[in-house]
Amino acid sequence: MLRTLIVEDSLAYRSSLAELLSERFPCLDIVEAGDGAEALTLLDLQLPQLVFMDIKLPDANGLDLTRAIKARHDGVVIAVLTAYDIPEYRDAALASGASYFLAKSASTGEDIAAVVDSAFPAACG
């Protein structure tokens, strides 16, 4: 099982992403957080190997959370998934320790699946 954490404040988007991932990768053990505090709690309880991180959260900045996660667990793969598709955010996400940057409006299900396939090629094989 590949433990995966989705950190996203929009319940509709979070549920949609979880559904897409679980259908494509039945081996994923997916947990969800709606804010930064919940994400940090789940991080320590679940020890995910993969995190999908939104930048704008009600109580935190996803880039700060990315840095905090990488400081605690350097091996965690983080994919920043955000509505803000601008080069400055992409650069900031990668500088914060994210391995991937995806724009919500431009990313397809295949793009999201490619993150899992790229980071964990034998995850469900």
Image: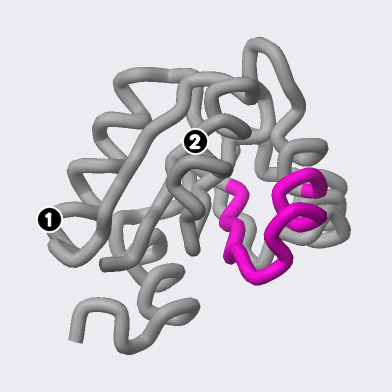
Quadrant showing the C terminus: bottom left
Q: Residue at x 33, y 66 (%)?
A: 2
Q: Quadrant of residue 54?
A: top right
Relative to residue 108, is residue 125 drawn left or right? left
Q: Which residues are magenta?
A: 67-80
Quadrant showing the N terminus: bottom left
Task: Describe the element under mark 1 as helix, strand or loop.
Answer: helix
Relative to residue 79, is residue 105 drawn left or right? left
Q: Do the residues bearing badges 2 and 1 touch, measured as CB atoms within 8 Å? A: no
Relative to residue 125, is residue 61 drawn left or right? right
Q: Residue at x 52, y 52 (%)?
A: 51
Q: Position of residue 75 (x, y in %)?
A: 65, 70
Q: Residue at x 75, y 53 (%)?
A: 72
Q: Which mark is residue 42?
A: 2
13 part of magenta stretch: no
Q: CA distance from mark 2 to mark 1?
A: 22 Å
Q: Which residue is mark 1?
A: 23
Badge 2 crowding class, 10 Å Cα cut-off, few under 14, some 14 to 19, many 20 or more, is: some
Image mark count: 2
- Between circles 2 and 1, the one closer to the viewer is 2
Relative to residue 97, is residue 6 drawn left or right? left
Q: Nearer the viewer, residue 31 or 10?
A: 31
Q: Which mark is residue 119?
A: none
Q: Position of residue 69 (x, y in %)?
A: 71, 49
Task: Describe the element under mark 2 as helix, strand or loop.
Answer: helix
User: What is the three-letter code of the residue carrying label 2?
Assistant: Leu
Q: Farthest residue toward the front?
A: 45
Q: Position of residue 10 (x, y in %)?
A: 43, 19
Q: Residue at x 87, y 59 (%)?
A: 95
